[in-house]
Image (cartoon, coloured by chain):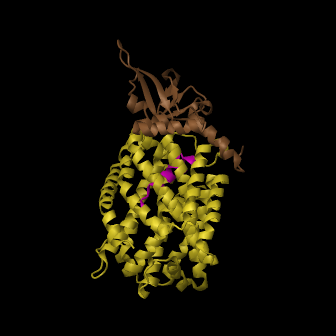
Chain colours: A brown, B yellow
């Protein structure tokens, strides 16, 4: 039986995990394409601070993006995961990615490099 | 033995609820001002907390999702942003107060001004989080926390009028001619500040760290009861000691040097070191728990990789959060912010967000996708509703009472 997918119940805010069940992030935003002659279509799941903050305040979202750019963390844009990458739906949503290499880990990588690895005992 | 070790999570969680600096001073104030009459507030707070803690643990054991993660997934970031922001502020305030409390304990032992201890204490907290494993933290702190049972032993040594003690468990109005606003303020402090969001989030994260599963549901029930019971008994012991030692002499607790007197009557020259050791361990344990909890709630609400047993390089965001929080705490204490003022502020904040923290329990603990066959029964749901009603009432009265009855 093909189950329905309720975008807001089953996808938005859910935990995303990668191929090896490592956390990617939460589904912070959903992007739909509006088409003239067909119903709207889900084109991407967004992950990242800018995507979360956009849901609360546009101004906070652009401030976060500016900070990420200024510090050289990333372009400030959220990671966009196309729905074709979805492998499995459950309490967690599994996607066909390698989490630590994605844009969702931009802050993780930046903090490791600029702060954590400089403190003794970090395991680097 | 293995199950005994599992109790460590309950005991360490309860330390930040009952034995940390704010709870200790509230209990001591309650005993000094109203003898045993406020014991009922400790008892009610304990029962509420046992139920909520059990639910947080059951959620984690069955669904492998922590409370903070489930609230995000089930309610979305728009709802969660309010309690989450409040909890970040709250945890940082209380963390600061705990660093301050540990400094006071070291001051009592050494005579050296408390502010000099802020940086060493903060480094001790940070170092254990940076290097330690979760099991070392939970078992070490809970073992050391047993020293606080000295308060309970002290009550027995001083042979109170047990009839009066029993009477204290019956909720009563303030005695005629006493300061009713202060009585109300203390009752709200005990009730509201004990049922703290950080205990619930920390416990459910701990259940994941300890890799609990469906087989641990009974263990969880016992650990929640034993752990919160331990904290509660110590809290009652502090209240009782203040009732027996401070109340007859008309001493009101507004400085720790006075609270320290409570143990010198039964234990003589050992009284002060015992008091200082209990205060230090309570505050140190609570500071560890709050620092970790900040990392937990942010990681879980935002879906990051997390875990105290990972090397810092493998969860850099997680480690950065507690590192920054501890640094802020140390700076505030060095700057001379008084810990007791912070605990008053944090108490009000805890009570104000309590309804938002408790409400999700009604939904998530009844959701078969998370709990499968282990959903809440009718009694558990009724208890959550009662706590919600109590929380709403407390949130309405906390600000007026804090103005009228706080001191």
Q: In the rendered view, would you say B218 is above or below B184?
A: above
Find the magenta span and give its range: B194-216
At x 39% / y 32%, what residue is drawn? Answer: A9
How many discs mark residues in the rendered view? 0
Instruction: Give whichever of B59, B285 is nearer the camera.
Output: B285
At x 61% / y 29%, what residue is drawn? Answer: A98
**Image location of residue B298, percent across then percent down:** 51, 46
Predominant SS along the magenta part = helix
At x 40% / y 25%, what residue is drawn? Answer: A5
Q: Is residue B202 magenta?
A: yes
Instruction: Give whichever of B374, A6 is nearer the camera.
Output: A6
| Res. B189 image quadrant | bottom left
Q: Is residue A20 magenta?
A: no
Residue found at the far bottom of this picture: B249
**B95 sits to left or right of B252:** right
Residue B358 seen in the figure: yes
- Position of the N terminus of chain B by quadrant: bottom right
- Position of the C terminus of chain B by quadrant: bottom left
Residue found at the far top of this picture: A37
**Image location of residue B244, percent across then percent down:** 44, 83
Instruction: Give whichever of B160, B364 is nearer the camera.
Output: B364
**Image location of residue B320, percent across then percent down:** 60, 48
At x 43% / y 28%, what residue is drawn? Answer: A30
**Image location of residue A39, percent across then percent down:** 35, 17
Residue B214 seen in the figure: no
**B32 sits to left or right of B307:** left
Q: In the rendered view, would you say B282 is above or below B156?
A: above
């Amino acid at each position: 039986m093909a189950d329905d997918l309720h975008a807001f119940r089953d996808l938005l805010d859910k935990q995303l995990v990668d191929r090896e069940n490592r956390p990617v992030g939460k589904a912070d935003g959903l992007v739909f394409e509006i088409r003239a002659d067909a119903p709207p279509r889900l084109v991407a799941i967004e992950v990242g601070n800018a995507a979360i903050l956009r849901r609360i305040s546009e101004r906070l979202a652009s401030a976060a993006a500016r900070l990420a750019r200024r510090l050289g963390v990333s372009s400030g844009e959220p990671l966009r995961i196309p729905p074709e990458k979805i492998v499995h739906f459950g309490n967690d949503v599994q996607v066909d990615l390698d989490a630590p290499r994605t844009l969702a880990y931009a802050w993780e990588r930046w903090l490791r490099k600029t702060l954590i690895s400089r403190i003794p005992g970090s395991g680097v | 033995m293995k199950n005994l070790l599992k109790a460590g999570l309950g005991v360490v969680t309860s330390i930040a609820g009952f034995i940390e600096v704010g709870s200790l001073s509230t209990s001591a104030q309650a005993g000094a001002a109203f003898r045993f009459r406020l014991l009922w507030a400790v008892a009610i707070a304990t029962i509420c907390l046992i139920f909520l803690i059990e639910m947080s643990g059951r959620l984690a054991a069955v669904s492998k999702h922590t409370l903070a993660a489930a609230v995000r997934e089930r309610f979305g970031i728009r709802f969660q942003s309010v309690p989450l922001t409040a909890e970040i502020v709250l945890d940082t305030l209380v963390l600061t107060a705990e660093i301050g409390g540990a400094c006071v304990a070291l001051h009592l032992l050494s005579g050296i001004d408390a502010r000099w201890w802020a940086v060493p204490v903060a480094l001790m907290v940070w170092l254990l989080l940076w290097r330690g494993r979760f099991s070392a933290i939970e078992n070490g702190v809970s073992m050391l926390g047993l020293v606080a049972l000295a308060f309970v032993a002290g009550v027995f040594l001083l042979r109170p009028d047990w009839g009066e003690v029993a009477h204290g468990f019956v909720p009563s109005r303030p005695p005629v001619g006493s300061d009713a606003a202060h009585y109300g303020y203390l009752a709200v402090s005990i009730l509201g500040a004990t049922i703290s969001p950080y205990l619930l989030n920390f416990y459910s994260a701990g259940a994941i760290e300890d890799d609990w599963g469906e087989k641990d549901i009974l263990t969880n029930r016992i650990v929640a009861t034993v752990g919160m019971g331990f904290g509660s008994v110590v809290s009652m012991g502090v209240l009782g000691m203040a009732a027996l030692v401070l109340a007859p002499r008309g001493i009101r607790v507004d400085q720790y040097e006075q609270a320290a007197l409570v143990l010198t009557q039964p234990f003589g020259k050992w009284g002060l070191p015992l008091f200082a050791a209990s205060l230090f361990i309570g505050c140190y344990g609570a500071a560890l728990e709050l620092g970790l909890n900040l990392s937990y709630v942010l990681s879980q609400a935002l879906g990051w990789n997390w875990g105290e047993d990972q090397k810092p390089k493998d969860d850099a965001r997680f480690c950065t959060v507690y590192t920054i929080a501890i640094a802020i705490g140390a700076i505030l204490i060095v700057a001379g912010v008084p810990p007791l003022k912070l605990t008053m502020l944090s108490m009000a904040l805890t009570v104000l967000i309590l309804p938002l923290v408790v409400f999700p329990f009604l939904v998530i603990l009844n959701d078969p996708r998370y709990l499968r066959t282990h959903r809440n029964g009718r009694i558990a749901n009724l208890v959550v509703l009662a706590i919600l009603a109590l929380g709403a009432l407390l949130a309405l009265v906390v600000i007026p009472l804090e103005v009228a009855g706080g001191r």
